[in-house]
Image (spheres, rainbow, N blue to C red):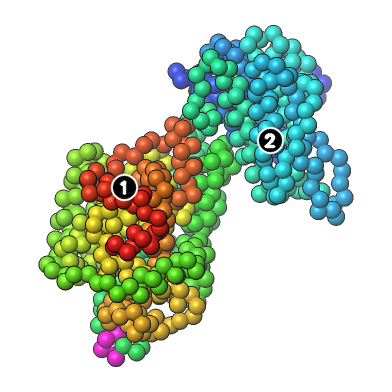
Amino acid sequence: MSSRANLRSAPSPFEPKFGQAGALRQQVGANGRAHVDRWLPFLILNRGNEQEASLARRIAIDSPSYLIWTSQDDLAAMSALEAVAAALVERSGRLLVVTLDDQQIGPRDERSQSLPPFVAQLGAGDQGNVGRAAAILDKALHAVEIDLRHCKVERVPFAPILPKSFDDLLNQLDGVERLTLRVPQIHRRADGGEYPGIRHDLAAAIGDALLRTACAFVDDGHTEVPAHYRALGRSAYLTAALKADRRLDKVARSFDFLLSISPIDTAKAYDRFAATGKDEPPHFHYRPLTVDPDLAKRELYSIDLDALEDPMLEQLLGEKRRELDAQLTMLATRNTPAFRPASMFLYGSVEATLLADAEVILSASSKDPPRGAAVDASQVAEAARALASRYSAIDPSFAPRIEVRDDVAGLLVSGNKLMIASDTIMPANRLGALLAHEVSVHLLTYFNGAAQGLTIFRTGLAGYEGIQEGLGVFAEWVSGGLTRTRLRLLAARVIAVEAMLKGATFIDVYRLLRRDHGFSSKGAFGIAARVFRSGGLAKDAIYLRGFREVMDLARSGTSLEPFWLGKIAARHAPAIEELLQRGLVQAPRFIPLFLSDEETQGQIAALKRSDSFNHVLSGA
């Protein structure tokens, strides 16, 4: 083959196909790509070798505005850079171009466990917009801490990382200002491998620092800047993100976790238990599994989250994948000794403060007034449909399925369904509070989550159940229906979970609740049955824990609005705020109706004036 055959002819001029809002995603040469989320005043460049694992390239790809290519595509990249940069300058008036590269590190002893120096090399001028941006990047990088190490920043004279032809091109474009960053390589092992956790954290931290830098570049005292620097992040989901979300949702919908681990014959089991003298542990029956846990896990881990190009989404979907993995492990170990520790992995143990709260509640001598009138399952269903219709009048997308069933105990929400046990009998004065919990929290957050761009917000982000159940109990409290009996029930669940996790048997827990805490035979059985379902479930401690967490948030004046947007955990509130800033999620379509009541507002105002959770409980 002649050498002439190896030469590439000059490519056709790059013609950017910007959308109306400035979105662009086009191939550059054989291995490159230009991506612009929308009209933005910055562009990240990386020229590397696609065959090598490059942290600089990972950071570039995760940004909302980038151009990446390999040395073989320099001519195509030159054309693309000229066209894209010119368009961005024309739109914004000026453009910050940041060139990223990996620092070169010398050979190290493979036997050494030491990490390379944690130093970033920043090249930029000190004047004007780019000087202000460089100062912010310097400060942001100094704040990066990975594995108890803080990043240091070495300021170096600006020198182009790219070939001279690129430097000449950028110098000719009016409005373009530049800086370079050689990123640390502390994720690399001496044997040539990587520390993946460090790599992920470092890429996310430097990407975040670059968004701060871009915001500082724009903030010249004359130009309008976003309310939060993260508003400059991506405002649209890539196809890869939507696909990964759908695949996760498919696995999540292949089984109903709560129904799969809950008995189908609790009422009959109690009859058998009572008939045998209440001294033999009951035998429960369960639904056959609708999923093979091992095959479902294989599907879970075939999902490529690296393709999302968004560290925040990668984190949220990765957490959900691990939670689904834990649930599938529990299904695979259902009714075996391994189920209990698997349950602890997902729901944790009972902390001392929670146990103390439960004991205080159970030791209180105050009681509820006589029960009064009662309602049955059909009346509960009728009232639930009436409440749901009030939300449907706001938006017809609120369309739950409300079913009376023989194979559940109590009330249970799963997805868009409210299931009511056919043997339900409850005090009429508890009905409003219970529906506030089930309809105005669980169903409401499902339908709000369904209105977001990703299904994970209706399925639930990892760990959402604690705050979700806490919101439900909070709804009961502000609705005036959190009775002393109900509060004792939640406290008893904590006591029962603690005893179960310490090795108590079903009969031990049943007798503990009867003898020490005064529960009826049927009540003690129901609590023990929940806690010992499938071999020992630690979930029931989350109700009181979540209630306390929500009450503390409300008492401190923290807005609960992010929690209505979908099914999220408390730790996800900052992530939701970022996604709102970026326009990737929308404000909740439905707000609980109970929040509009004057009495509710009065109770919340009084809560803010109280000095502790126990002070509030004393009035329950």
Decide which of 67, 17 is in the foreground and name it.
67
Query: In the drawing, what numbered circle is on residue 141?
Result: 2
- The residue positioned 45% from the left and 77% from the top of the image is 499
**Disc 2 to disc 1, how far (Cα)?**
42 Å
In the displayed structure image, the side of residue 618 where residue 239 appears, left or right = right
- The residue positioned 22% from the left and 45% from the top of the image is 598
Residue at disc 2, secondary structure = helix
What is the chief secondary structure element of the magenta stretch?
Answer: helix
Q: Which residue is mark 1?
A: 605
In the displayed structure image, the side of residue 252 where residue 7 appears, left or right = right
Which contiguous range is marked in magenta? Answer: 272-277
- Residue 353, image x, y percentages: 47, 66
Residue at disc 1, secondary structure = helix
| Occupied quadrant, residue 86 | top right
Q: Amino acid at mark 1?
A: Ala
- The residue positioned 22% from the left and 46% from the top of the image is 597
Q: Is residue 316 above or below residue 221?
A: below
Decide which of 135, 414 is in the foreground and name it.
135
Decide which of 515, 281 is in the foreground and name it.
515
- Residue 205, image x, y percentages: 63, 39
Q: Is residue 447 above or below residue 331?
A: above
In the displayed structure image, the side of residue 71 where residue 530 appears, left or right = left
